[in-house]
Amino acid sequence: MQETSCAPANPTPGGPTQKGFARALVDAFSLSLSVFAYGTAYGALARSANHLLLLQTLAMSVFVFAGASQFAILALLHRGAALWAIAGSAFLINARQILYGLTLGQSLKHVRKRQLVWLSHGLTDESYSIATVEAGRRPVSVPYLAGAGTAVFAPWLLSSAAGFGLGGLIVGPARFGLDFAYTGAFLGLLAAQLNQRRHVAALAYRWFSTSGAVVAGALAAFLAGVYRK
């Protein structure tokens, strides 16, 4: 009799891993373009308004990797805020990632914890938005999450460098609306998600103070997602 091997076949190009990663890149393509746009704004502001070095600008994009926090850090540095105030503000702004992780948790039970550690660095507003859509269709795979994070991280880092190069040519970046770039992109991302009444309900807390509105709106959105039918 001819002996047959029970060893698993070697993965071939275009297999499940490559397909999951590539599919995430395709799903996030339009978001990658918007990330590049306001990443350029971040780089320009870092140089022209804050006079940061290129290494400092890119280091923040690599290790902080959070658009809202990075714009807030630039604003606080420009005002000469204390280090504890800058770190505390960045933490509070990024605290919404905890809610992101909780809502995606049910779809990630099959993922090893050590994999989640490095995948969590790529969890942003954009990668979360496409991951939640993917979770509604099938279990979210590690390659898909890695692709979603890469689709945001790569254009953010490249545009930070590009914006830094352009920053020396721009005088008064606020005149061109660059300080509103992140806010505008986030509003566009939000509008694309408002397709049911319970999503709109999360915006009903504008009567609170600014900080209260952020906390109340985040909790309402989280509860709406957890108890969806």
Image: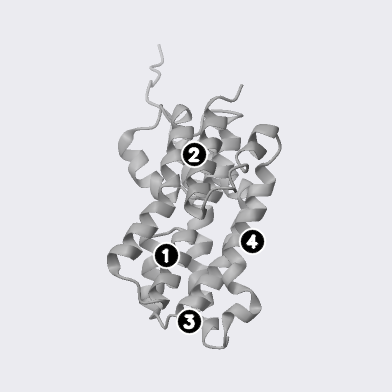
Farthest residue in the top direction?
1
State whether residue 79 is above or below residue 94: below
Pick the residue in front: 155 or 169. 169
Q: Nearer the viewer, mark 1 or mark 3?
A: 3
Q: How crowded is the residue under tag 3: few (<14 C-alpha within 10 Å), some, or many (20+)?
A: many
**Is tag 3's residue or tag 2's residue first in the polypeptide sequence?**
2
> Tag 3: residue type?
Ala
Compute the Cα span from label 3 to label 2: 43 Å
Closer to the eye: label 1 or 2? 1
Q: How many numbered marks appear?
A: 4
Tell me which label, 4 or 2, sits earlier in the chain.
2
Q: Residues within 10 Å of mark 4 (few under 14, many from 20)?
A: some
Q: Which mark, by number, is residue 49?
A: 3
The residue labelled by disc 2 is 17
Residue type pointed to by label 2: Thr
Residue 61 got which mark? 1
Secondary element type, mark 1: helix
Q: Secondary structure at mark 2?
A: helix
In terms of depth relative to the viewer, which is nearer, 62 or 78? 78
Residue drawn at point x = 40 percent, y = 45 percent: 119
Mark 4 falls on what kind of element?
A: helix
Disc nearer the start of the sequence (3/4): 3
